[in-house]
Image (cartoon, grey):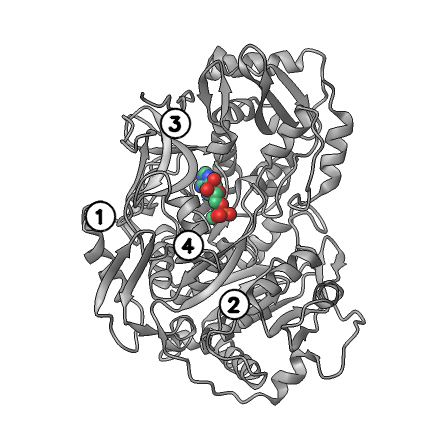
Amino acid sequence: MKEKHLEALLKEERVFSPSEEFSQQAVIQDPSIYDQGQDYLSFWEEQAKNLSWFSPWEKTLQWNPPFAQWFINGKLNASYNCLDRHLNDWHRNKAALIFEGEMGDSQVLTYQDLHREVCKFANVLKSLGVKKGDPVTIYLPMIPEAIIAMLACARIGAPHSVVFGGFSYNFLRDRVQEVQSKVVITADGGFRRGKTIPLKVNTDLALSDVDCVNNVIVVEHTKEKVHMEEGWDLWYHEEMAKAPRICPPEPMDSEDTLFILYTSGTTGEPKGVVHSTGGYLTGVSTTHRWIFDLKEEDVYWCAEDIGWITGHSYVVYGPLANGATVLIYEGSPEYPHRGRYWEIIEKYQVSIFYTSPTAIRTFMKWGPYYPQKIDLSSLRLLGSVGEPINPEAWVWFHKYIGSGKCPIVDTWWQTETGMIMLTPLPGITNLKPGSCTVPFPGVKLEIVDKNGDPVPYGEGGYLVIKEPWPAMFRNIYGNPEFLQKTYFEHWPGVYFTGDGAKWDKDGYFWVLGRVDDVINVSGRRLGTMEVESALVDHPLVAEAACVGIKHELKGQALVAFVVMKEGVQGTPGLGDNLKNHVVKKIGALARPDDIHFTTELPKTRSGKILRHILRDIAEGKTIGDTTIVADSSVVNSLQSNYRR
Ligand code: WTA
């Protein structure tokens, strides 16, 4: 029997074409690039030639599903590609990193500076006995030393495992133990919202019952007093002062592990995603250059932490391999005031700004007052990643941040894909708010039914990837069975993303949300994105999350959690108003049975809405593990205010 696909309800007719001015200067101007991508092996081979290889590969791809190998026997080094090769000409004096601290302090490192610091730190790691293949754990705030540490690991072939600085000590302990790091790199603390985060204290707690670690390197940042254990804890600046300045890059095999990155997704179970060197760098550098339309003079800001894949691929490896000027900011968007991001954009004349829908919806909740006060005319391109962007949030971003002139690249990808997979190419793609448009050249995504057959245009189904791509993850650390079971079990040789999506009549992709979150109302399957977008379409709503809870007659009832824009007064008829708005927008089938107003939604630390927790709240279940939630007080207050 044919699987009942996901419903495709939302009709979004607005189209935004790139201006002639933008198209004529764009890196990619010729749509025939998509034809070139059809032969994906020769396409990726061409792109890999843009990297510097110590010795060339002998075979492009070996594909034994679920295991891929790319550019077999090729030798290269990621830090060489991000640094050394830019030192032969004027680029050595180009700003590689611009750091802005929460307190307004700043620092600029040219490519030459960054190269020197990376070489020295690589020598520090070597002096502590770290060798090729030894995983190193990095637990740092968004400061230049975090990127120096990552590239130093890459230089000597030690895979890094970055643990987001906002994670608690038990997360850190588990990660360190799993990869058996000999060295952990941390700081005395980090700054966030005018307060400090006690990273060293957390590290001490984490390592108190771990026996693999020999040394902890501590960056002096907040200058708070911390306990330093003689012979075990070492100050970064003291070790750097002693370190030689020359460190040749280790020739790495294309397939050697560049890093391990733990991700817990929205469901909880953490998995160590393993990425390679040659294929990964090929994927992230090509996508970064084409999608962000990178020019020499750009100041590029991706406002994501290096603790996430976005930070790895599009703060560090993609941009630096391309010789870009990368801005990093340590603090939060609302400290000391809500115009902080816009002030930074103006201060450094940022031209490309990449952020998440969750941040955009927060800006929307605060209102346009803050960006409107500041001159944002340096911006020429915007990007979004991490969740489906609701069309109204897209339009808000376009209007108030992009002054109606900047294309927005809505980029769909995953920790596992390593690189952006669905995206516009901003000089040639017509944009539709809410759609991440089409596959990047050389990648093969489809939307299929239960049998693995493509669904017709206009319908929804499962988002899958049919052919290997160079930046795909190579394994789940210590657990290859998990890889097969989680991603490749449904259809042989086909990667299942876990997301539902629909195709519109033009073949554009619209991601509808995780299939685990699908709501089943009277046998009709609704993705969360469409109902949420219909709610966010209401002028008073900033954010919404929808869940299905058990219902005797309908299978599931649809409950919506809604966050209003600031300053909006609740009125008695508002809930009914919103329900009617959904009906008007996408049909009676999607009418919420219940609307619950709240000021915050439970989210992961990377900003994704945790719908399964909302489902448990709405069903009156006890909520088990809330360690995955960024702010557990949000869960407590939702629980105590929820009326059933
Ligand atoms: C979601 C983040 C819609 C999706 C790079 C995916 C998106 C998961 C988009 C991966 C987008 C990411 N539109 N949904 N543009 N980007 N997602 O591993 O559900 O943190 O499967 O990687 O985020 O999240 P991850």
Instruction: Name the secondary structure under disc 4.
Output: loop
Q: Residues within 10 Å of mark 2 (few under 14, many from 20)?
A: many
Please give the name of the residue rendered at 22% of the width and 49% of the height, measured from the top-left corner: 37
Of callouts 1 and 4, the N-terminal one: 1
Q: Which residue is mark 2?
A: 160
Of callouts 4 and 2, the N-terminal one: 2
Which amino acid, by three-letter code, is at mark 2? His
Of callouts 3 and 2, the N-terminal one: 3
Q: Residues within 10 Å of mark 1 (few under 14, many from 20)?
A: few
The Cα atoms of the two marked residues, 1 and 2, are separated by: 38 Å
Q: Where residue 440 appears, x then y in whole percent?
A: 31, 47
Relative depth, front residue between 616 and 216: 616
The Cα atoms of the two marked residues, 3 and 2, are separated by: 43 Å
Q: Which residue is mark 4?
A: 418
The Cα atoms of the two marked residues, 1 and 4, are separated by: 25 Å
Please give the name of the residue rendered at 73% of the width and 30% of the height, measured from the top-left corner: 638
Instruction: Name the secondary structure under disc 1.
Output: loop
Q: Which residue is mark 1?
A: 30
